[in-house]
Amino acid sequence: IPNLAAHLFILYYASISAITPPVAVASYAAAGLAEENAMKVGWEAVRLGIVAFIVPFAFVLNQKLLVVITGLQIEVVIDLIFAFLTCLSLAFSAQGWLLRDISIFQRGILFLTSLIMLSSNNLLCLAGAVVLFALYILNKKLVKTKGMEV
């Protein structure tokens, strides 16, 4: 692992320790302000911030995301787009919402899709993007037929 990726990995996890129990300084402060159970707020913060736990692994698995090279090449742009779609897929899975409430089955598919898209293999990332797009279209049609607001 290159030094930059390793150092960013450590820095990133040190930063998000503010929401992770048992440290969860930010979560405990928020719980005090909201007069809510601190552990409940801490675990909710972890659930909402699940994407933040995956991003450092993306840096390590695909160093092109660090954009250390001079000039922005097309491969880097493609990798950045796939990284964005990976985060989006994981966020939809964690929240259980993609234009509407989604089933546990769709959440599982989105979670597996995000894990597959973590690789630096563009073919696997493209397959994951197709699955994400297909679920988006399916849910958009379901929302339209049931007359739900987006």
Image (spheres, helix red, strand yellow):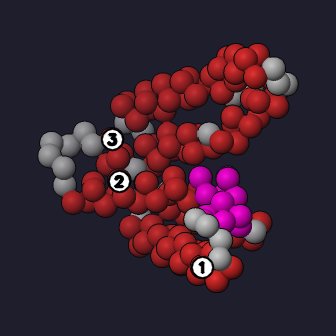
Q: Is residue 98 magenta?
A: yes
77 left or right, relative to 24: left
Residue at mark 2 to residue at mark 1: CA–CA distance: 31 Å
Determine which residue is flagged by label 1: 144
- For marks 1 and 3, the one nearer the N-term is 3
Residue furthest left in the image: 71
- Amino acid identity at mark 2: Leu
The magenta span reads 91-102
Mark 3 surroundings within 10 Å by alpha-carbon count, few (fewer than 14), some (14 through 19), many (20 or more): some
Amino acid found under the numbered disc labelled 3: Leu
Query: At 19% across and 49% down in the image, what residue appears?
Result: 72
Residue 70 falls in which quadrant of the image?
A: top left
Task: List the residue tagged with mark 2.
Answer: 80
Q: Position of residue 6 (x, y in %)?
A: 44, 32
Q: Are marks 1 and 3 in contact (CB under 8 Å)?
A: no
**Where residue 134 sits in the image (x, y, percent)?**
53, 78
Q: Which is more toward the observer, 135 or 60?
A: 135
Q: Secondary structure at mark 3?
A: helix
**Residue 77 visible somewhere in the drawing:** yes
In this view of the protein, which residue sits in the foreground, 1 or 24?
24
